[in-house]
Amino acid sequence: MTRSEFDDIRAYVADETTQARDLASIARNLIDDLERAHMREAALRTYYLRLLTAARATVAAETVGAPDPLAFVKHELDERGQLPEDGEAVQRILSDARAAAALLACLEQTPQTRPRGPRLRKCVGTGRSLPR
């Protein structure tokens, strides 16, 4: 859910003319959204743990001189259909990796500053509509 959607919900809840049944409907929708987000987070944590385990096993296999140390990472990528298939895909993946590394380096160097003064609220987007 976007910041704008949260702001819209806050404004709707704060409105004294909002009916209790409308608030209950919003609460049900928010609980459903929260449950879906929790499930997505659990799936992402599982994927991350599997990839991290495969990466660690790959490094360990290389350390002991295993014949195919990349087998663990290849297996994880293959299960997700993420193995590069041809030379063009390989070059694109390497280019994307270099660009991502450069972007992360830039983000780590630039301090995040928040604008001073009152926060301007914008209501944009069509992701969620509130009952009226």
Image (cartoon, rainbow, N blue to C red):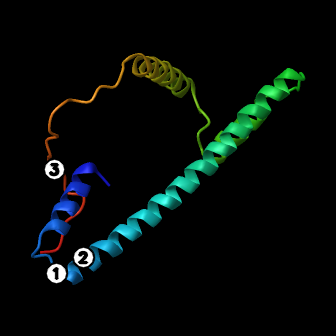
Asked if the residue at tag 2 contacts the one at tag 3, i.e. Cβ–Cβ closer than 8 Å, the answer is no
Query: x%, y% of residue 72?
Result: 76, 37
Instruction: Answer yes or no: is residue 94 visible.
Output: yes
Secondary structure state at the residue bearing disc 3: loop
In the displayed structure, does residue 37 sit left or right of residue 59? left
In the displayed structure, does residue 30 sit left or right of residue 18? right
Query: x%, y% of residue 63?
Result: 85, 21
Tag 2: amino acid: Leu
In the displayed structure, does residue 12 sit left or right of residue 102? left
Residue at x 49%, y 18% (from the top left corner):
98
Residue farthest front in this picture: 117
Residue at x 79%, y 34% (from the top left corner):
57
Residue at x 88%, y 26% (from the top left corner):
66
Quadrant where the C terminus sits is bottom left
Secondary structure state at the residue bearing disc 1: loop
What crowding class fits label 3: few (fewer than 14 Cα within 10 Å), some (14-19), or many (20 or more)? few
Mark 2, residue position:
23
First in sequence: mark 1 vs mark 3: 1
What crowding class fits label 1: few (fewer than 14 Cα within 10 Å), some (14-19), or many (20 or more)? few
Mark 1, residue position:
19
In the displayed structure, does residue 63 sit left or right of residue 107? right
* The one of 92 and 125 positioned closer to us in this rendering: 125
Mark in front: 3 vs 2: 2
Structural distance between the alpha carbons of marks 1 and 3: 24 Å
Mark in front: 1 vs 3: 1
Query: x%, y% of residue 70?
Result: 76, 29
Structural distance between the alpha carbons of marks 3 and 2: 21 Å
Mark 3, residue position:
124
Secondary structure state at the residue bearing disc 2: helix
Tag 1: amino acid: Gln
Tag 3: amino acid: Val
Reply above or below: 19 against 120: below
